[in-house]
Amino acid sequence: MDLGLGGRAAIVTGASRGIGRAVAERLVAEGASVLAVSRTPGDGPGEPFAADVTDPASAEHIVAACLERFGRVDVLVNNAGGAEPVAFDALTDDHWHRAFELNFHSAVRLAAACVPSMVAAGWGRLVHVASVSGREPDPLFAPYSAAKAALLNWSTSLSQAHAADGVLSSCVVPGITRTELVAANAEATAERTGASLDDVMAKQLARHRVAAGRFGEPGEVAAAVAFLASDAASWITGATLEVDGGTLRAT
């Protein structure tokens, strides 16, 4: 199926690994030019661009780089994010600030920087990588969960503001996905507790109650992102596409 992404230009944040890298690979395979944004760019799909999206000045620099290199900006994939486990009664203002800067405010700033070019062109796709934690909060990741819930809500507002301009905004909602970060955390837990890596991974699946009985793969999330970024999704906006193996029981 031709998604109509040939000749399009996309910005993907958090593109050096995990879901972001898989998204960049998929968009390049579909014929798009990709500005692959990360704090420490390495070898990978697309053209690397070093930026820390938590820096308020970075949004304008990222969009300017996309326009300079490709002459246009058609797709923004807000994928950069992260979480740290903190007991609820140990949370500080700094935990909340860091979580919202990385998982919410960075996306807001980048979308605001992209929208004028998209509106002028009469075509744009804003795709935000949220999380099942934004729907079913995890008390060990309270700031992250709240930031992802805000992202889901804000995406709907954005969709209503610009749908008539041809600029569409939707979210993908991944469940637990086999990324480098998940693997590293599991290995650290296994080392700390003396459990086997297989046992740690099995406990993670059980904790998340994944109906499919397995972890997701980054490429599976990337396929959903590519669809929402494409002509095939031309009448979809304000949507939340769950890619979670049946983790969420209700919407």
Image (tube, rainbow, N blue to C red):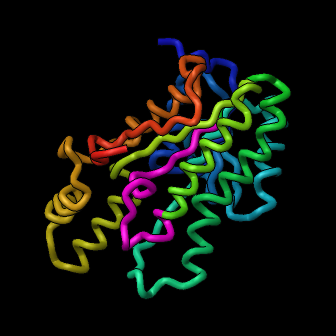
The answer to whether residue 136 is above or below residue 73 is below
Q: At which x and y percent is residue 239?
A: 52, 35
Total marks placed: 0
Range of magenta residues: 126-145
Left or right of residue 50: residue 1: left
Residue lying at 46% horizontally and 12% vertically, measured from the top left: 1
Where is residue 183, by image quadrant?
bottom left
Residue lying at 60% horizontally and 18% vertically, measured from the top left: 231
Nearer-the-camera pick, 161 or 62:
161
The answer to whether residue 203 is above or below residue 223 is below
Left or right of residue 241: residue 155: right
Quarter of the picture containing the C terminus is top left
Is residue 120 highlighted in magenta?
no
Q: At which x and y percent is residue 30?
A: 55, 22
Nearer-the-camera pick, 152 or 14:
152
Can residue 24 be seen in this snapshot? Answer: no
Is residue 134 highlighted in magenta?
yes
Can residue 99 be seen in this snapshot? Answer: yes
Residue lying at 37% horizontally and 72% vertically, measured from the top left: 139
